[in-house]
Structures are given as structure tokens and as C-alpha cells.
Amino acid sequence: MDFGKLRAKLVRSLGPEIRDERTLEVMGCIPRELFVPPEHRHLAYMDGPLPIGEGQTISQPLIVALMTQELELSGNEKVLEVGTGSGYQTAILASLSQFVVTTEKIPELLERAKEVLGELRFRNIEFHLAEDSLGWEEGAPYDAILVTAGSPQIPPQLLGQLKEGGCMVIPVGGRFDQDLLKVIKRGEGSKISYLCPCRFVPLIGEGGWEG
């Protein structure tokens, strides 16, 4: 299969809904097929989620692009990603920011993502096996936070790790269906914008769902 042509076709299809050219350019360069199991690689450039093992999925490319775009990264940020998953979103964030800290609860997924991202020669990513507490407080504060699992609320633990004026994009709602929200931290409060309906695996742990 000519993955390059399929990748270019997918990126063109995202153009009408995604306005950020940097996000589209990066997605046009990163080989999504490397982040899915071999048996699903022929579907890598379908605009939909795919299973990656351990009961987890790689997100729909349109949602990946939208979440990335809404962080409004300039290239100088330190970003926290909650939920490494396949590592595909991690690669996009690392291509658009200065440094990424990413956490994952499932050791097998974390190791697989580290291997693929290492092969792609990313050197600005710090990987951590997630603990019971959300995020990675040792690296805080962050300019931006992206959460790739659905939470019942906007976790105060993550807001506490976000810089003043920083941006977090997170799915919030039920265990199976959520609203994608953009949160800008401002003093004691936050500006919250609704982006779209979405469906993510549940966020497990303190501030999320019970296991």
C-alpha cells in the first residue's frame, strides 16, 4: 500500500474542518500506520478510531487534529499528555512543541509507544508510567495539557499543574460519551469552551473514574 498517498488524502479531507496549517503539515508527515497493529495497518488512514490492544484505541484523526489545533501551540511550550496510548498523538505534540511529558497507565502500551517514537528519532519526549494521581506533578507547571481519556469532571489535579493562562483540552461527560472541552486557566476560575461531542475510553484514577 502507498501509505504516503493515503496520508496525503486523509490530510486533505481534514482541511475543511481544521484551520491550523501546522497541525495538518505535521499529520502529513507522521506515519500513522506505525502506531497501529499490523493487522489494522491497511485501515490506518481511515478517518476513524482503531483498536491498539489492551482494550484501548487510537483516536479518529479528525479528533486528534482538532484537539491539537485547540492547544494553539507555537513551538515553545512544555506539554503534558495524559494517556500516551499508541503514541501517535504524542508524536504530533512533540513535533509542534518544545517538550512533551506523557503518562500511560498500561505498561505494554507505554513500552510500545516508546519503541516506535524512538525509531522515529523523537528526543523531546519524557515517558512515565502513570500513578494513581493524574498527570505528572514533578514536571509542572505546563503550558498546555491534552487528555486522551474521558473524565466525569475537569480534574482539579490537572488544573493545578497548568500554568496561568495555559490551555487544557479534555473530554468530559459520561463513561462512554463525552463533550470535548477547551479550558483556559484564569486566576481562580477558568474559561471553558465546548468543541464537539466525542467518545473516549474512560480516564481511570484520582479525578477520573474508579477502575
Image: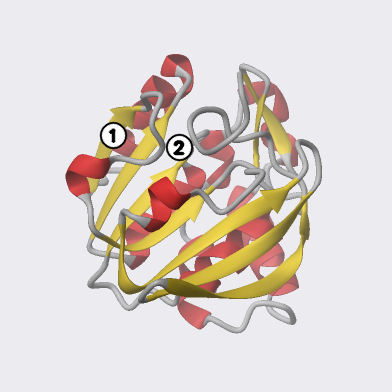
Residue 202: image location, x then y, percent:
66, 34
Q: Residue 84 carries which label?
A: 2
Task: Residue 28: tell me if it is visible.
Answer: no
- Residue depicted at 81% across the width and 45% down the height: 177
| Local secondary structure at mark 1 | strand
Residue 74: image location, x then y, percent:
32, 78
Q: Quadrant of the N terminus?
A: top right
Q: Which mark is residue 158?
A: none
Label 1, residues with CA under 10 Å away: few <14, some 14-19, many ≥20: some
In this rendering, would 176 be left or right of 3? right
The amino acid type of the residue labelled 1 equals: Phe
Q: Quick one: label 2 or label 1, which is nearer the N terminus?
A: 2
- Residue depicted at 28% across the width and 73% down the height: 75
Query: Residue under circle 1?
Result: 127
The amino acid type of the residue labelled 2 equals: Thr
Which one is in front, 207 or 116?
207
Label 2, residues with CA under 10 Å away: few <14, some 14-19, many ≥20: many
